[in-house]
Amino acid sequence: MQFSKTPIAGLLVVKTTPHADERGYFARTFCEFENQEADTPFHVCQTNISQNTKRGTLRGLHYQGEPKPDPKMVRCIRGAVWDVVVDLRQGSASYLTWFGRELSAENKIAMLIPGGCAHGFISLHDDTELLYLMGEHYVADLACGVRWNDPAFAIDWPIKPVTMGDRDASYPDFIQT
């Protein structure tokens, strides 16, 4: 695995290194040892799948609040998405910075997202699926979100949403404290 830094402190792009032959390929997609060696310790306590039927499905921007922010590693295992992370950690050098990148089954790239950052994506193909490795258990009372098109972030989404959940559509604008 190869870890690349982004403009957001602690947010890493993770590229797998497939070993291919006539059968196909094999690739390590997570290794606690390799994460520690790259100075990005991450312990998995839960895994989740997000299946999205239609192109243009938007989910986010979600995060889990204190005292249990939820770091995660997100990988697209079918189709493709435009994946976005916004740094909401007060005191961070990259506070309110956003970073986006295409994740697809084809490019085999994941994002390792620090706790305290909001995350969302829009599906670029029909029948898209993401795998989440979670570094914290879900706590419903700590679930938060901010509006996907909040002017405070000015995220450059590649397409307009066609489908969105009521909760995601009704998140408020971000208010700095």
Image: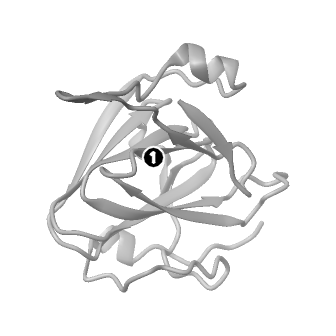
What is the number of callouts on the image?
Answer: 1
Farthest residue to the front: give it: 22
Q: Residue at x 48, y 79 (%)?
A: 157
Q: Residue at x 46, y 32 (%)?
A: 17
Closest to the observer, 157 or 143 = 157
Farthest residue to the top: give it: 33
Left or right of 12, for residue 120? left
Residue on which the image places disc 1: 109
Residue 50 x, y percent position in the rendering: 26, 50
Left or right of 100, for residue 133? left
Residue 140 x, y percent position in the rendering: 39, 44
| Screen quadrant of the C terminus | bottom right
Amino acid, disc 1 = Ile
Q: Residue at x 59, y 19 (%)?
A: 34
Secondary element at image label 1: strand
Residue 127 sits above or below residue 78 on the image: below
State the scheme by which the image is colored. Answer: one colour
Closest to the observer, 81 or 63 = 81
Residue 93 sits above or below residue 150 on the image: above
Answer few, some or many: residues within 10 Å of disc 1's Cα (few below 14, many 20 plus, some between 14 and 19): many
Residue 86 x, y percent position in the rendering: 62, 62
Left or right of 129, for residue 141? right
Residue 67 x, y percent position in the rendering: 62, 36
Residue 48 sits above or below residue 171 on the image: above
Left or right of 150, for residue 104? left
Q: Residue at x 58, y 34 (%)?
A: 2
Residue 76 sits above or below residue 177 on the image: above
